[in-house]
Amino acid sequence: MPTSVESRAILQRLTSTAVESSAALFDRFNGPPEIVRGALLEAIPAEIAYFSNGSAALAADTYEEERELAKVRSTFTAEAVVLDRTVKVRRAVAWAAEPLFLLRPDRLLTASRLAELVQVEVARPNRDTTLANRRRDPASSGWRRIARPGACSFCRMLADRGGVYREKTAYFASHENCHCVAQPVFSTDDTIEVGAIQYIASKRNKTPEQRARVKSYLENFYP
């Protein structure tokens, strides 16, 4: 079974494959925009669901591998978590199809939007699985973010110094083409908790003041 570092590379390949597969489907859909949009509304959610199962299963396997590496003595079976996001995905597909209805239809923009949607949605179950199992597992003391080499300043800041997110409500902040993964942590030895700014940056909804604080922090420490 893969470690979290290996899992990050596998997840990136998985999401890339999903994007390529969805692009190939879109290339086959031609005709009036209403017909193409209808075809996308049928095909893309199913495509995302297929790859999401693999994404979640990868995280479940990785969770158990990290647990074994940490020499946790208690037993625990990690479960794959794929939340039902059908309504949100269909809304996003409709948004992606909007450029097809322009006076001069823009298939390139639609393709770009679909790639963004598929990448984000296929990566989501991987993180959801790790965080959900971390909350269920009494042996887990938190999770840390593993960013890819050359990651953006936002991801590098959230993963800085290998800090651990101990709050069970901590949200995994991500963006388009984010290839970070969550790594479960099972011991408090030699680990530090992330700072307040990282918790603020991870919030789902930030106030204007909090957004400004995060922006200023990034500009000063991650130029």
Image (cartoon, helix red, strand yellow):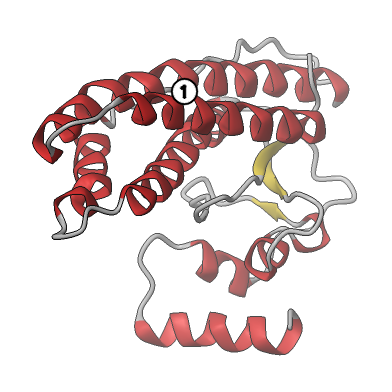
Q: Position of residue 191 (x, y in %)?
A: 83, 52
Name the residue type under label 1: Ser
Where is the N terminus found, in terms of image quarters?
A: top right
Q: Position of residue 72 (x, y in %)?
A: 80, 20
Q: Residues within 10 Å of mark 1 (few under 14, many from 20)?
A: many
**Label 1, on which residue?**
52
In terms of image quadrants, where is residue 77?
A: top right
> Up-down: is 65 above or below 181?
above
Of residues 130 and 194, the one nearer the viewer is 130
Compared across the picture, whether 116 is left or right of 194 comes to left
Residue sitting at x 62%, y 24% = 59
Compared across the picture, whether 204 is left or right of 68 comes to left
> Up-down: is 22 above or below 199?
above
Residue sitting at x 28%, y 32% = 85
Residue sitting at x 36%, y 84% = 208
> Up-down: is 206 above or below 10?
below
Q: Secondary structure at mark 1?
A: helix
Of residues 88 and 133, the one nearer the viewer is 88
Where is the C terminus found, in terms of image quarters?
A: bottom right
Q: Is residue 132 visible?
A: no
Q: Position of residue 94 (x, y in %)?
A: 19, 43
Q: Position of residue 209 (x, y in %)?
A: 41, 87
> Up-down: is 112 above or below 6?
below
